[in-house]
Image (tube, rainbow, N blue to C red):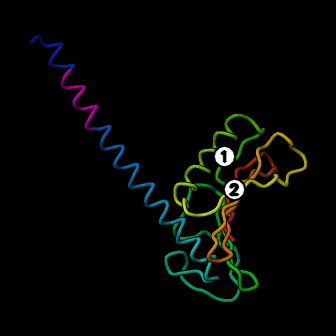
Amino acid sequence: MNVRHLLFIILLTIYGASSVHAQKQSAISDSLWCDHLNEIIKCASIDEITDRIGNKDSSYINGRRPYLRLSNARIEFIQKEYGKVNYVCYLYTGKEPDKELEKQFIHWYKKIKDCLSPWEVSRLKNADPYSPTVPDDYFFTNSEDETSVRLDIVKDKGYSVRLRIF
């Protein structure tokens, strides 16, 4: 066996090992992400902000960043108003309703669907009257209580993929 073949085998072995490690990391991070999502859903379901999300619960909590975060988005908050807990996160923002916006929308839909597989999923007409080009919203509902998860595209200073839990 010459040196080139030996180097090729070594590189192939290293690549295979790193690929398996990356798949394990992805499964762990997806599992952790689902845990965070379910904790936020739990807060909305019981209308209390748990210790894992925030440090105190009261009848009114102005929007603040949760301890457990679902993304690195600048705008991500949980709040409690009128005894109800809701969560909002802008997962992606772009200037136009382009392919990247749609790609991010589909990416986040699949990620949420994987975590909430027993939930019912509906498509609702997007409420944005300015853009007929954006896809319909995804609306996840749990038949056990009235908790809902909604993924939609909104227009503000650009177009954003927004996740709301209420």
What is the crowding at mark 1: few (fewer than 14 residues within 10 Å), some, or many (at least 20)?
Answer: many
The residue drawn where x is 64% and y is 62% is: 120
Specify the quadrant of the image occupied by residue 77.
Answer: bottom right
What is the crowding at mark 2: few (fewer than 14 residues within 10 Å), some, or many (at least 20)?
Answer: many
Check the image and report above or below for 130 versus 11. Answer: below
Given contact means CB atoms under 8 Å apart, are the residues at marks 1 and 2 in contact? yes
Q: Where is residue 166 in the image (x, y as percent from the top left)?
A: 69, 71
Check the image and report above or below for 58 versus 124. Answer: below
Instruction: Count every numbered label the image shows and give the total.
Output: 2
Q: Mark 1 points at which residue?
A: 105
| Disc 1 to disc 2, C-alpha distance | 8 Å
| Sooner in the amino-acid sequence: mark 1 or mark 2 | 1
Q: Mark 2 points at which residue?
A: 151
Horizontal side of 166 relative to 72 (left or right) equals right
Of the residues shown, which amino acid type is indicated by label 2? Leu
Specify the quadrant of the image occupied by residue 79.
Answer: bottom right
Name the quadrant of the N terminus: top left
Q: Where is residue 90 in the image (x, y as percent from the top left)?
A: 68, 56
Check the image and report above or below for 7 versus 124. Answer: above
Q: Position of residue 2 (x, y in %)?
A: 11, 10
Name the residue at the left extreme: 1
Range of magenta residues: 9-17
Q: Position of residue 76 (x, y in %)?
A: 64, 62
Check the image and report above or below for 52 versus 5. Answer: below
The residue drawn where x is 64% and y is 77% is: 145
Name the residue at the top extreme: 2
Question: Is 103 inside the magenta-drawn segment?
Answer: no
User: Magenta stretch mostly in which secondary structure?
Assistant: helix
